[in-house]
Image (cartoon, grey):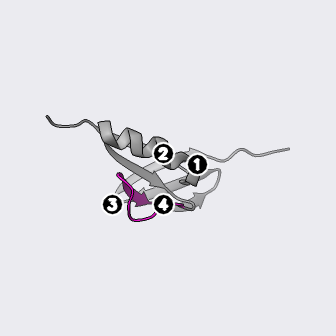
Amino acid sequence: MKRSKLLILTNSIPEYRLPIYNKLAKSFDLTIAYFGKSATNQNEDFKEIKLKAKRLFYFILFVYNGLIYIDTIKIQN
């Protein structure tokens, strides 16, 4: 049976989240896209995509293979 695909967008992959990501990968074809640091090693059950972040005024653009994800920056007064 074909597994559903699941994409998680996050700022980093900390070590404490690895067990839950590996459990999700048993049920889904899991890919995690991130732009910060990753605590993974080569033995994880999911795929990773390292995003490049670019700032444009009050926005952050994450670009990968022609796909663009846009987030806003909170300005503190």
The amino acid marked with disc number 4 is Thr
Instruction: Give 16 or 62, whichever is nearer the viewer.
Output: 16
Pointer 3 residue:
65
Pointer 1 residue:
16
Give me the disc on residue 19.
2
From where the camera sits, is residue 71 visible? Answer: yes
Inter-mark Cα distance, 2 to 3? 28 Å
Q: Residues within 10 Å of mark 3 (few under 14, many from 20)?
A: few
Q: Is tag 3's residue or tag 1's residue first in the polypeptide sequence?
A: 1
> Which contiguous range is marked in magenta?
38-51
Q: Is tag 2's residue or tag 4's residue first in the polypeptide sequence?
A: 2
The amino acid marked with disc number 3 is Asn
Q: Secondary structure at mark 3?
A: loop
Q: Outermost residue toward the left?
A: 1
Please determine whether, in this image, residue 20 is positioned above or below residue 54: above
Q: Position of residue 17 (x, y in %)?
A: 54, 46
Please determine whether, in this image, residue 53 is positioned above or below residue 7: below
Q: Main secondary structure of the magenta part?
A: loop
Q: Secondary structure at mark 2?
A: helix
Foreground tag (2 vs 4):
2
- Please name the residue shown 48% across and 45% down the image: 19
Inter-mark Cα distance, 4 to 3? 22 Å
Question: In the visual, does 74 lie left or right of 21?
Answer: right
